[in-house]
Image (tube, rainbow, N blue to C red):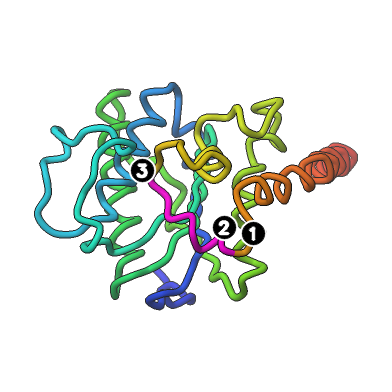
Amino acid sequence: MPSRIIPFVNDHFYHIYNRGSEKRPIFENQRDYQRFLKTLRYYQIEGPKPRFSRFPSPLVNKLDESKQIVEIIAYCLMPNHFHLLIKQLKDGGITEFVGKLSNSYTKYYNTKNNRVGHLFQGEFKAVIIESDEQLTHVSRYLHLNPYVACLTKEVDQYKWTSYREYIDQGFPGLCSKEEVLSHFKGPQDYQQFVLDQASYALEIEFIKHQLIEEV
């Protein structure tokens, strides 16, 4: 297997994503989404911690954040793929985190569905974030994904992204939002930043599908 070309550097941001093998669904119901979020929260912390089977909801539990190997900045879970915007904090953090996340969720999914084999389509993909502008735009891209895919009529009604964490300071969550929100006057400005692009993103997606159908 060829080695990954992109290096993972501490204190840098990366867009991480992967899809189900053969584009198969990886989330089939609410329990699956919740399990993945719980797994996200659990494996971003290294060292001794409660057994995963006894680990409560990621949205209410507090682990020792000083032992984080990555920070989750934003996320989007779609029926057959996921997107993560994350920051590496410790050497090898992203590789360890995504590896344990993928293995743990695959074991859960295979056991639940009485199947064997790979769930995800090979090695996860990674894109380094090279500017503050790219950081904010990638976060917007993640949060608009379900709307563009016509999974929701309102951006803030889709439950499986970090968008509501960003626009509602009282909403419980697992993301470190400060890195993105520091570029805006507040959550309302960020919300407008996302919504200003919603119609255009939907139009571009429609045109793309039309072109594919005509080929």
Which residue is painted at 69% across and 28% down in the image?
Answer: 154
Work out whether residue 38 or residue 120 is closer to the camera in this orientation and state it. Answer: 38
Residue 3 appears left or right of 204: left
> Which residue does the numbered mark 1 point to in the structure image?
184
Between marks 1 and 3 in the image, the one whose residue lies nearer the viewer: 1
Of 189 and 201, nearer the camera is 189
Observer able to see residue 199: yes
N-term mark: 2 or 3: 3
| Residue 111 falls in image quadrant | top left
Residue 81 in view (yes/no): no
Look at mark 2 in the image and give the residue it sits on. Answer: 181
- The amino acid at mark 3 is His
Task: Name the residue carrying label 3.
Answer: 118
Which secondary structure lies at badge 2?
Answer: helix
Q: Amino acid at mark 1?
A: Phe
Regarding mark 3 in the picture, which secondary structure is present there?
loop
80 to the left or right of 176 = right
Q: Which residues are magenta?
A: 174-182
Callout 2 amino acid: Leu
